[in-house]
Image (spheres, rainbow, N blue to C red):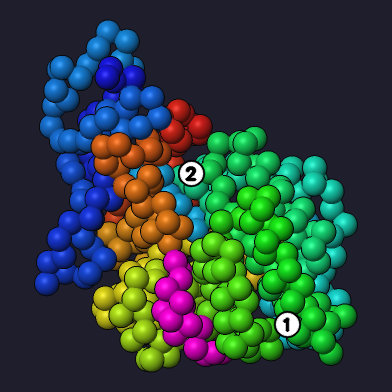
Amino acid sequence: MNADLIIYNIGQLVTGKELPIIASESPMENIEILKNGYIVICGSEIMAVGSGDVPSKLIKFTTKLIDAEGCVVTPGMIDSHTHLVHGGSRENEFVEKISGVSYLEILEKGGGILSTVKATQDSTEAELIARAKKSLKIMISYGVTTVESKSGYGLDSETELKQLRVNEILNHEQEVEIISTFMGAHALPEEYKDNRDEFIQSVIDLLPIIKERNLAEFFDVFCEEGVFSTEESRKMFLEAQKYGFKLRIHADEIKNTKGAELAAELEMYSADHLMAISEEGIKSLKNSNVIANLLPGTSFSLGKEYAPARKMIDAGIQVALSTDYNPGSCPTENLQLIMQIAALKLKMTPKEIFKAVTINAAKSLGREKRIGSLEEGKKADFVMFDAKNIEYILYHFGTNHTNKVFKNGCLVYKR
C-alpha cells in the first residue's frame, strides 16, 4: 500500500495506545506519547505510527507531506454524552437560574425540560438538522470527530423517532460520526404523573420499532429521584437488552439511587454523571468494565458538587469525560473547556484527561477497535493542536487550541 498522507515533525504524538500500568503511576496515565513523531495514512486508515525520521520506503511520489512544526497531535476526540438534537434554547431562564430560582419553580412555570420538549415537538426535522449541524461545526472546531447523540426531548413516540431519524441523517450529511442513543425515559410527561407504568410501557413498546429501523445502538434512562427509580430503570433496561440494545445510564447525578451499582450489575458500557456516587457504587464500578463518564461542565453550570474523579481513578476505575451538551444544564459544545474544568476542579492530570476523551470514550461507545487511539489499522481521526505539549492545552484555558482536524484521513477543519 502507498502512503497518501504523512504528518511528520510532531513534537508530542499522543497515540493513546494503552501501555502496561506502572504501580507508581495513576491507572489512567498509561497512554503512549512519542516525541518527534509521525503518522502515515493510507486512505481512511493509519498505516504506521512512529518517532524519528519517517522511513524513506513509506514516501512515494504521490504522498502528501505535512510538517507539524513541533505541535501536539492526538487522536480525534470523542464526545460520548450529548443531547445534540433538540429544539429551542433556554436563555430566557438564565437570569432566574443565577438569581437562585430553583429548577422546580422554573418547571412549575412550564420551563426547564418541559419547554425543550415542546420546542422539539414543534420543530421540523429540517429545523432540528440545521440546529444540530451548527453545533457539530463548533464541536469539530474543538477537535471532536465522534459524538454520541441521545433522543429524550420528545417523550412521545413521534418526536422520539424524529430525533433518532435526525441522528441517522446527520451521520450522512456532515463529517462527525454520530452514535445514536434512544433515551425515551428522560423525564415523566405531565400527563402521565398519575400513570407512570403506562408511560414506561410506551417506552418499552418503542424498543422493537427502533431496533427494526436501526435508529439507535444504545438505550439510556435517567435513573434519579423524582424521575425513574432503580427498579423502573432495571425493568426498561432488561427489556432493551432483549432487543439487543447496548446500555448506558444517567446515574447518581443529584441523589444516590444506586445507579452505579445497576450499571455494574447489567454490565453497561457507561455510567454517566456520578456526582452523588456512593462508596458502594465506587466498589461496584471498580469490579466491572463499566466506564465512569463524568460531565464536569454540568456541575460548573449548575453550581453543584463535582464527581469524585480522583477517588474513582485511584480505585482503578476507568473514566471518560464529555460535554453533556444540552440546552438546559450544560449549553456548551466546547470539549476543550470540559477538559480544562476537569484539570482545575476534578484534579485530573493531563494524561488522564486525554485518555478520558479518546480511548476511554471510545470504550464507552464500543468503538475502541476503530477509534480512540492512533494505531495501525485504526481510523485516521486526529487533531493537530497549536501547542508544544498537552499541559499547555489545559493550562491556557478558555481558548481554542485546535489547528487542524482530520476525519478518516481527510482535513475537515482548519483554523
Residue 317 horizontal side relative to residue 209, left or right: left
> Residue 276: x and y, percent?
49, 86
Residue 394 seen by the camera:
no
Horizontal side of 27 relative to 259 (left or right) equals left
Furthest toward the front, the residue is 242
Residue 310, percent across and down?
32, 78
Decide: is 13 above or below 398.
above
**Label 2 amino acid?**
Thr
Residue 400 versus residue 355 in the image, above or below: above
- Which quarter of the rendered picture does the N terminus lie within? top left
Q: Which residue lies furthest to the top in this view?
A: 61
Q: What stretch is highlighted in magenta?
A: 254-270
Name the residue rendered at 24%, 50% in the picture.
Answer: 17
Residue 105 included in the magenta stretch of the image: no
Task: Tell me the element at label 2.
Answer: strand
Nearest the camera: 304 or 258? 258
**Residue 53 x, y percent position in the rendering:** 13, 27
Q: Which of 368 and 93 is in front in this view?
A: 368
Tell me if I can see residue 39 in this picture: yes
- Give the alpha-carbon distance from disc 2 to disc 1, as whole Å: 33 Å
Crowdedness of circle 1 by 10 Å Cα count: few (<14), some, many (20+)? some
The circle on residue 103 is 1
- Where is residue 49? Give x, y as percent: 22, 35
Q: Mark 2 vs mark 1: which is more N-terminal?
A: 1
User: What residue lies at 64% left-to-right and 56% top-to-bottom?
Assistant: 211
Residue pointed to by mark 2: 145
Q: Type of residue at label 1?
A: Tyr
